[in-house]
Each structure stands twice: as C-alpha cells, then as structure tokens.
Amino acid sequence: MKALTWQGKRDVRVEEVPDPRIEEPTDAIVKITSTAICGSDLHLYEVLGPYLKPGDILGHEPMGIVEEVGPEVTGLKPGDRVVVPFNIACGSCWMCSRQLYAQCETTQVTSEGKGAALFGYTSLYGSVPGGQAEYLRVPQAHFGPIKIPQTGADERYLYLSDILPTAWQAVKYADTPPGGTLAVFGLGPVGQFCARIGRHLGAGRVIGLDLVPERLELARRHGIEVLDVSELSDVPGALIDLVDGRGPDAVIDAVGMEAHGSPMGKLAQTAAGLLPDKVAQTMTDRAGVDRLSVLHAALKAVRRGGTVSISGVYGGEADPMPLMEMFDRGVQLRMGQCHVRRWTDEILPLLAGDDDPLGVEDLRTHRVPLARAPQAYEMFQKKEDGCIKVVLAP
C-alpha cells in the first residue's frame, strides 16, 4: 500500500510499504477513505524529529471502512464505516473505567513514561503506524473505532478522530460560566472549533486571537469576535481592557510549542534539531524547549480566579512558568491529551442532523490526493494559499 512516511526534518514522502495485517485478536484493518493533517503533525515535521525514524508512517486523524476484524472484536464487522480516535485505549482498565482514555494502562508507553499509545506519533507514544495511508491496523478495535452512519460526507464525521473532541474537552476544561467570556488563543482548526463550541455550550462572548487573516475571517464568519494580535503591542492588556477591566473568565491556549513571538524558544528548538537524536532527546527531556509566549499571555490575560485550558501540545520538561503571578491571581490550569471516547457520544448527535451547528463542513480548505501529501505539509506549515485544514484522500 501507499503511505506517507517521515524521512527527516521537513522531509515526508509517499512510499510503498507492506499492507497491515491482523496481529492481535483485538485488531481491525480499516481501508482509509479520508485522513487529515493535524497541527500537531507539524511538530513532527519540524521539532520532534529526534523521536522518529525514517520510514515511520504518520497521521492520526483517519476514517474509513472496516475490512477485517480479529476474533475478539465483536462490535464491528466488515463494511462498517468508522472514525478512528487518535489515542489507543482498551476501554476497561483502571484509567479507562474513569474515562481517562488518554492514560489507558493497557497501551501506556511505560518505557518512555508516557500515556496511552497514539497513532503515527513518535517513539514516545509507541511508534504505532499512522493513518495517512491506504490501510490502517487498529489495535484495541473492540473499543476504539466510532461507528458512524453509512451516508453523509466524510468531513461531517472525520474530525471526531481528534480535533473536534479535543476542542470539546478544551472548552469543558475551561469551564466558562454561563453567559461569561471565553478567549481562544490560536484560530487553527482546534481553535476554530473551540470558539464555535464555546458559543454552543453557553459562553456569552467568545473572542478569538490570531495573526493569520484567513483564520480571523473564518472565525468572523461563525460569529466570533476576533483580535489580530499583530496589531497589538500588549495582548493580555488588550484582553483585560476589552472585558470589564478584569479579563476573560476562561482562556484556551490552542497553539502550543511552536507559538510565534518566542525567539529564545525557537532558538532552543532549532539547536535541538541540529544535535544527534540521543543528545536532542536528552535536551528535550531535561530542558525547556517550548515557545511560551502564548501560554504566558493566556495566564496574564485571564481574570483573577479564572481558568486557562491548554489544548496545544507542549514538549519541554523544564519550561519556566510565572508561578507567583498564577498563585496570587488564583488561576486554575487544566490540560492534557484528549480522552476522545469520553466526548464522542455527546458530539455525535450534533453531526447527524442537517443544521451542522458546529460548522464541521466549513473548516477544510484543501482536499488533495495522498500522493500530494508532502506538498500539503509544506503548504500547511507555511500557511500558504489560505490553508487552514487539509484532508488527504488515499
């Protein structure tokens, strides 16, 4: 089959690789019909190369048709249409029984001290072949795959794999009081959904912040108040002034480790990328290599006693944080990988009707063949051609 493989920093290629097969009785094989490029895939493209090896298959936002199931998979059959969550969970261990699926103890990568295994996401999370391919082996298929209706466009359901439940969790963690104000830093795909979900779940005012014109316009189209941060010298101050002199009740950081405006963080990431993999891994594991400008702005902008919810991916182990200010202002902080299956039963009914309240069919800007995935990665990273979300068609 054809699959997108990582070969080096900013070097991904579509290659012929062996077809996946059933390896465990709880496996399934899914023929992929649509698979998306995620913003966190760009961290692999740019920063997290020391944890990849040439030939690793990328991608963790897939959906398709079940081709084959193992003998212990009773809830699926060939021909079922499914979305595959990006994290791999058994559904029955101590963590899963508490709906903490991103910490599944059956698939935890204990050798690296990390949580549940992820599709297509480095040795830190199990080096499981990803879904930017024609076929995908799905471990723990007795629990993970989400059965969806046989009709309807792929893009009505595709985002259940990651970014839609990730945004849903971020908004739930933000805990904006009814009628309160939610600010969303970063209007990429997750940030767009955070803003829309925030309104849907009862925020009286949602403010989105970004510097990319196309992202700002897309948010405006969905009734979101926007701020262009490139026009602001003091982003936290502007938010505080805009919201009663106190600041928003809740703030979501939907950006993560590669934020603009963090020259020292960028320098650390660049330096790590020039080192041999083992040395770079040690630097990442023991040092702060994140760009923290957005997170620090979020912490300074939220009102006293408010909540900052982090959905953007961070990778540093020793990042400096303004703890005195956080403590003095009573800021609550929530974060973590999304527990996808915890939220999908709430979200799925919103996708099945005709009204599309979350605007899932108004996010993708580019749909391209899998063969053009390398060009799509470059376009997405450089934010060219108005690119906000790419869907690949194997």
Image (cartoon, rainbow, N blue to C red):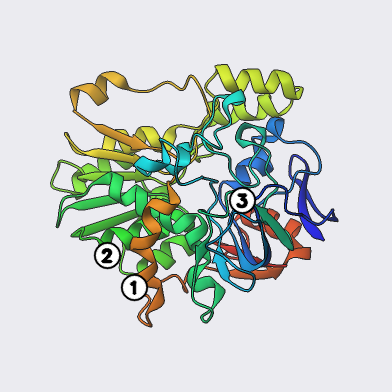
Q: Which residue is mark 2?
A: 200
Q: Say if 236 sits above or below 197 in the image.
A: above
Q: CA distance from mark 3 to mark 2?
A: 37 Å
Q: Say if 278 sits above or below 224 in the image.
A: above
Of badges 3 and 2, nearer the viewer stands 3
Mark 1: secondary structure: loop
Q: Which residue is mark 1?
A: 357
- Residues tagged 1 and 2 counted as in contact (Cβ below 8 A): yes
Query: What amino acid is found at the position of numbered circle 1 in the picture?
Result: Pro
Q: Earlier in the sequence, mark 3 or mark 1?
A: 3
Mark 2: secondary structure: helix
Q: CA distance from mark 1 to mark 2?
A: 8 Å
| Residue neighbourhood size for the residue with mark 2, other residues' Cα within 10 Å, grouped as few (<14), some (14–19), many (≥20) | few
**Residue depicted at x 55% and y 18%:** 287
Left or right: 45 in relation to 344? right
Q: Give percent across and percent down for residue 289.
A: 55, 26
Q: Give percent across and percent down for residue 376.
A: 69, 60
**Residue depicted at x 30% and y 39%:** 308
Q: Give percent across and percent down for residue 228.
A: 39, 54
Mark 3: secondary structure: loop
Q: Nearer the viewer, residue 182 or 96?
A: 96
Q: Nearer the viewer, residue 387 or 228?
A: 387
Q: Which residue is mark 3?
A: 26
Left or right: 218 in relation to 176? right
The image quarter in which residue 136 lies: bottom right
